[in-house]
Amino acid sequence: MKRRLVAAIACRNQGSRLYGKPLQNLDVSESIRIIDNIIACLESLPCIDEIVLGISEGVDNEVFKEVARSKGVRYVIGDQIDVLSRLVACGQLAGATDVFRVTSESPFLYFEEVEELWRLHQKQSFDATFMDEVIDGCGFEIIRLEALESSHANGDHRHRSELCTLYIRERLADFKVHKAPPPPTLVRKDLRLTVDNPEDLAVCRIVYGVFKDLAPRIPVAEIVAFLDANPKLIEWIAPYTEAGYSTMYR
């Protein structure tokens, strides 16, 4: 049976630090939003058979239905807290054998290894392939739909939250998991490219402005080189990085 990889993007607007993160503009003048760049990047990957939005219930999230319609992608509506159920529903709607997961507030996917890791995921019959150690916000997960369904059926409220693969990660003896290593130059605990705070958004807007001619496939290595050449930008996001947390609380 031919495997079918479906990208599931969980969408909601609620956020205590920054409202409407997926709909924030990367390019204000052109009205290019974070979710626009994510979808465009996913559409450029031959291995992605379909994109489905997993939209949270609630009036604040109705706007994502229009995003889906404007992009020509399908969507499901589901529980706000039970994010895992929305990912499962996305996969089931699209007849997926496997689900490709990225988060809706992270505009710059480490796309370069997606195709090769999908080939390896199939060849080795992995239940899950995790690109974890790359810069925060650039990683992704490939998970067999059956493994997600099992996680939802057998897990508890922790596993059904935004920590969608926690059940698998806690039971590595029960699942065949591959943790893919990124290049050492992209293992940077002092950097992040995900939007949770106003400072994150400011940095991502500047990055997009510099590399917009390459969008939506902006190489993460080039972003790193740019940030290293502009250390003030790294200072803006430093309090929110893993390295920043370690410094603050050691």
Image (cartoon, rainbow, N blue to C red):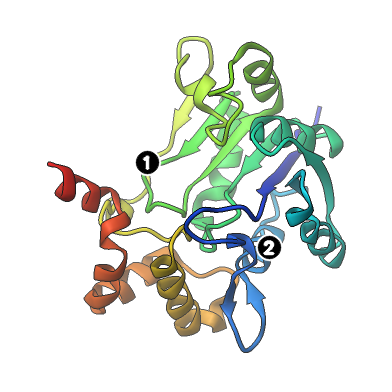
Residue 4, position in %: x, y?
A: 77, 37
**Few, some or many C-alpha atoms within 10 Å of disc 1 (few <14, some 14-19, many ≥20)?**
few
Residue depicted at 24% across the width and 48% down the height: 245
Residue 69, position in %: x, y?
A: 87, 62
- Note whether 39 is above or below 216 in the view shown: above
Q: How many marks?
A: 2
Q: Nearer the viewer, residue 192 or 226?
A: 192
Residue depicted at 57% across the width and 49% down the height: 103
Residue 143, position in %: x, y?
A: 61, 31
Residue 159, quarter of the rendered image? top right
Secondary structure of the residue carrying numbered label 2:
loop
Residue depicted at 48% across the width and 36% down the height: 130
- Note whether 3 is above or below 245 in the view shown: above
Say which quadrant the C terminus sits in. top left
Q: Is residue 239 left or right of residue 56?
A: left
Q: Nearer the viewer, residue 212 or 162?
A: 162
Say which residue label 2 marks. 44
- Note whether 198 is above or below 6 in the view shown: below
Q: Earlier in the sequence, mark 2 or mark 1?
A: 2
Q: Marks 2 and 1, Cα distance to the nearest angstrom?
A: 23 Å
Q: Amino acid at mark 1?
A: Pro
Secondary structure of the residue carrying numbered label 1:
loop
Q: Is residue 79 left or right of residue 210?
A: right
Q: Nearer the viewer, residue 216 or 248?
A: 248
Say which quadrant the N terminus sits in. top right
Say which residue label 1 marks. 181
